[in-house]
């Protein structure tokens, strides 16, 4: 039956759309006299675009130099890197503020429990995880006959620590031959920047790094990675814009094998997890890497700390497609709390492996659950 | 993007429909469910609280008690409140009586400013304006390059800092006016660097750029997937540079987009545009009423009509209507219509806009490539067969299957479906409500 479903749907859609078109036509007739509607040309002329791209060879070299210079300047003024705890200072402040109302109480009434739950929800922990946490704390508070608000805080911290219970957070290397780490995620989460930071770190550790610019969709994505390759001394493998990302990955693997590189970092195009074709493309990229057995040791889902509950869906879908091994939590230096990682680890068992807190190459720190939990509670 | 939210509401209201009147306990339950649904959709905690208290107040009031269909009445109230929260009217860009009109885009890293800038330029150009893109993002490596490539694609000039000229956002903004005058452009779209709202140095730079370009429209670009943080971001940017509105990006995912509700409610700034897809055409004005309808699973017929208008010519629509009315809808027409519908975008997106489509179908993934098989089957038929499928016998069937690389079962299924479509069209054109008589169609 699965083959027939589209027919069924199309039949229904056509029938309704035809009706709508007729209605629309009538409405349009009626109102065309009074207004000029914006009628965007809905169908892009793809062929034309391709041609334009092909001869639109911008002078990327000089652009790279321009930007390089600018970025170096920006880096020079950057303050010393901070630790996770310091970075989470603002998070802590916001959270502590919410908890302060609780810890001042001599007894916990329903309102107090609710405000505790709301504080967790405000941190993007999610309703179900927040409810579960609060219920667990409530139960243990009852058994232990704890009524004091500040003691409740201690219980909650313990529950969060339990939730983030020990997981292997090291980025694994292959036993022999080049190691491959692949980076996936939705648009704009910071995949390229995360890769750049890792390339700098691993390069400084004496590893020969190959960067595979398999994001051939976003304009100038390869240029962005190229700038970072130049800065970190990594080798860049790229294709033209609109090229098959599979070929880029294939070439990167071949290049890494022939040069005896240690590490290949694969930058993929940002894609929404709802786009079936793009997720299929991602599976294909993984298959190409998998042709070199045991090379792929990490598939990292890059997640923006400002992401809300959709982060859980993203993790679920990307995990289903390419077996995600860990999460890189980026942009944790704002006031965003990144609480969604609690839900991701508790529901999907995918641990956070990297935390990104800035734009400089040094702004990459390993995720320490104890510190994360402690930071939330102002210790 | 609001699918899951409307899904939740669907479940609540389906249960409510069976009841004649609502007790206080019912209303409490509804309020609890709505609260949960909104929180799961990332609507800000404070906004949810307000929203629920308004709903509760109105749901316990006289308008519901007097109503014969209290469930319907509650739906109406929720709908009205959603519209009110999202902003009651569609807001347009303010045009500067003395050109150029300046649109300044700001936001966090990765929210989609550069893409939104190009999409907005394309939209304004299609409306007859002459936009100039200004690349004032000098932080992210290759951001300027990205804008230049996009500008080339939509044939809109891009102003950027040439080699040797000062490489900072303020200088770029300053010289952009000369360029706009030189090229005779009447709208300037300024793409700024992504920044966190707490990064003082970059926020100061943004203020400096604002002071120079004096934007007619200062727009914050917000990712639809943003969680509770959306409100903090909007408040901070509003305090720093003053906002006139919001562009909500990436709503083509399945994020429920609570950010949209929160930002308008807390900061009072309307959402003006939404980014709806990967290509540069996927950018539309934001319609709060339509969005609210979508949240409630009431379909988005107005957007659909607009899309249909763009895809179908007036003659096409008229011809289709006549064919439908006379019941002479052939497989050729079917093929034709299918291609027209595909022009309107992915079938899945169109489905979401249709009212009354069962939830099961809305969630169904439509593999567009499968439509190619349908097309192949029809194309493997002779002209006579397409006009009158009843002549298709066993040997014709296997010929068609072979010709299209499908199976006779698939050919049979298509013919059967087509027959029901024909009947449906006939009854619709006679003003009857279609009964969706397609076998196997899940109907609630």
Image: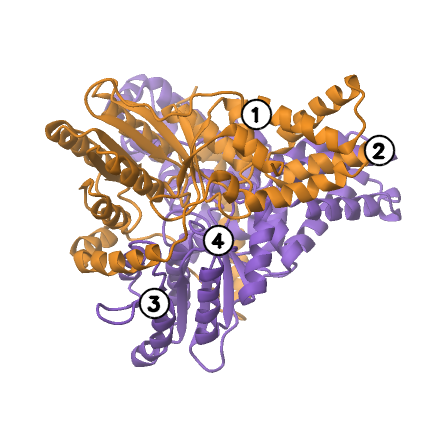
Label drawn at residue B196? 4
- Give whichever of discs 4 and 3 has the lower sequence position: 3
Is the residue at mark 1 from the same chain as the one at mark 4?
yes
Label 1 chain ID: B
Is the residue at mark 2 from the same chain as the one at mark 4?
yes
Whether residue A327 appears in this view of the structure is yes
Residue at horizontal 55%, vertical 53%? B233
- The residue mark sitting in front, 2 or 4, is 4
Mark 3 Cα shell of 10 Å, populated few (<14), some (14-19), many (≥20)? some
- Give whichever of discs 1 and 3 has the lower sequence position: 3
Is B13 left or right of B104, judged from the image as shown?
right
Is A344 left or right of A47, judged from the image as shown?
right
Label 2 chain ID: B
Chain B palette colour: purple
Residue A215: percent from the left, percent from the top? Answer: 28, 41
Q: Secondary structure at mark 4?
A: loop
- The residue mark sitting in front, 1 or 3, is 3
The residue that mark 2 highlights is: B20
- Give whichever of discs 2 and 4 has the lower sequence position: 2
Is the residue at mark 1 from the same chain as the one at mark 3?
yes
The residue that mark 1 highlights is: B442
Residue B78 higher or lower than B386, as above or below? below
- The residue mark sitting in front, 3 or 2, is 3
The answer to whether marks 3 and 2 mark residues whose Cβ atoms lie closer than 8 Å is no
Chain A palette colour: orange
Mark 1 Cα shell of 10 Å, populated few (<14), some (14-19), many (≥20)? few
* Occupied quadrant, residue A174: top left
How far apart are labels 1 and 4 at the CA level?
A: 47 Å
Label 3 chain ID: B
């Amino acid at each position: 039956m699965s083959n027939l479903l589209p027919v069924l749907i199309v039949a229904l859609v056509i029938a309704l759309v035809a009706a709508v078109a007729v209605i629309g036509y009538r409405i349009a007739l009626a109102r065309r006299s009074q207004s000029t509607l914006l009628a965007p040309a809905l169908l892009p002329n793809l062929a034309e675009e391709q041609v334009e791209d092909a001869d639109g060879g911008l002078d990327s070299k000089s652009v790279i130099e321009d930007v390089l210079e600018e970025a170096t300047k920006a880096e020079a003024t950057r303050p010393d890197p901070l630790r996770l705890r310091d970075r989470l200072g603002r998070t802590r402040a916001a959270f502590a503020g919410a908890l302060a109302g609780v810890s001042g109480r001599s007894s916990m009434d329903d309102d107090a429990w609710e405000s505790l739950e709301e504080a967790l929800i405000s941190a993007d922990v999610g309703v179900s995880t927040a409810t579960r946490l609060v219920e667990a704390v409530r139960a243990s508070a009852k058994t232990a006959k704890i009524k004091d608000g500040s003691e409740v805080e201690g219980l909650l911290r313990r529950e969060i620590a339990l939730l983030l219970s020990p997981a292997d957070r090291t980025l694994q290397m292959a036993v022999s031959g080049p190691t491959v780490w692949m980076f996936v995620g939705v648009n704009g989460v910071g995949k390229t920047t995360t890769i750049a930071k890792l390339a700098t770190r691993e390069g400084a550790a004496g590893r020969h790094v190959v960067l595979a610019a398999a994001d051939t969709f976003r304009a100038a994505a390869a240029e962005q990675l190229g700038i970072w390759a130049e800065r970190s001394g990594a080798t860049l493998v790229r294709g033209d814009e609109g090229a098959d990302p599979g070929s880029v990955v294939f070439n990167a693997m071949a290049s890494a094998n022939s040069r005896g590189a240690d590490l290949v970092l694969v930058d993929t195009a940002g894609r929404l997890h709802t786009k079936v074709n793009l997720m299929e493309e991602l599976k294909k990229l993984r298959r190409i890497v998998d042709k070199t057995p045991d090379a792929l040791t990490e598939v990292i889902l890059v997640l923006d700390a400002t992401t809300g509950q959709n982060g859980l869906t993203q993790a679920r879908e990307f995990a289903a497609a390419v077996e995600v091994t860990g999460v890189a939590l980026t942009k944790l230096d704002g006031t965003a709390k990144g609480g969604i990682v609690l839900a991701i680890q508790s529901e999907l068992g995918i641990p956070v492996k990297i935390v990104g807190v800035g734009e400089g190459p040094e702004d990459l720190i390993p995720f320490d659950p104890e510190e994360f939990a402690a930071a939330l509670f102002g210790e | 993007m609001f699918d899951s939210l409307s899904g939740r509401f669907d479940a609540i209201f389906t249960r409510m429909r069976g009841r004649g009147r609502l007790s206080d306990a019912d209303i409490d339950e509804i309020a609890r469910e709505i609260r949960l649904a909104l929180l799961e959709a990332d609507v800000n905690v404070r906004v949810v609280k307000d929203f629920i208290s308004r709903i509760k107040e109105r749901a316990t009031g006289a308008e519901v008690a007097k109503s014969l269909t209290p469930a319907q009445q509650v739906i109406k109230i929720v709908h009205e409140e959603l519209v009110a929260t999202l902003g009651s009217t569609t807001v347009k860009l303010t045009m500067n009586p003395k050109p150029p009109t300046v649109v300044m885009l700001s936001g966090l890293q990765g929210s989609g400013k550069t893409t939104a800038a190009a999409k907005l330029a394309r939209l304004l150009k299609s409306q007859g304006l002459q936009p100039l893109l200004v690349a004032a993002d000098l932080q992210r490596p290759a951001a300027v390059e990205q804008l230049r490539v996009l500008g080339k694609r939509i044939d809109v000039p891009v102003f950027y800092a040439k080699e040797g000229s000062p490489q900072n956002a303020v200088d770029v903004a300053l010289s952009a006016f000369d360029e706009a005058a030189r090229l005779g452009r009447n709208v300037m779209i300024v793409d700024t660097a992504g920044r966190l709202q707490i990064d003082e140095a970059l926020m100061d730079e943004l203020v400096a750029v604002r002071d120079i370009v004096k934007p007619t429209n200062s727009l914050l670009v917000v990712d639809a997937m943003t969680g509770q943080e959306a409100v903090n971001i909007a408040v901070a940017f509003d305090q720093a540079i003053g906002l006139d509105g919001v562009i909500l990006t990436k709503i083509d995912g399945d994020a429920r987009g609570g950010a949209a509700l929160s930002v308008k409610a807390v900061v009072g700034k309307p959402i003006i545009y939404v980014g709806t897809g990967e290509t540069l055409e996927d950018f539309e004005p934001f319609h709060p009423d339509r969005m609210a309808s979508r949240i409630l699973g009431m379909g988005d017929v107005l957007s659909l009509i607009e899309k249909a208008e763009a895809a179908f010519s007036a003659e096409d629509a008229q011809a289709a209507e006549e064919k439908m009315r006379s019941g002479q809808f052939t497989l050729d027409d079917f093929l034709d219509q299918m291609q027209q519908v595909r022009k309107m975008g992915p079938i899945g997106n169109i489905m979401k806009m249709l009212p009354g489509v069962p939830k099961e179908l809305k969630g169904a993934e439509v593999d567009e490539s499968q439509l190619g098989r349908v097309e192949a089957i029809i194309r493997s038929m002779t002209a006579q067969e397409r006009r009158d499928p009843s002549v298709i016998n066993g040997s014709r069937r296997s010929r068609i299957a072979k010709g299209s690389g499908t199976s006779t079962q698939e050919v049979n299924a298509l013919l059967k479906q087509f027959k029901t479509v024909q009947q449906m069209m006939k009854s619709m054109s006679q003003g009857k409500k279609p009964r969706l008589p397609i076998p196997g169609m899940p109907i609630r």
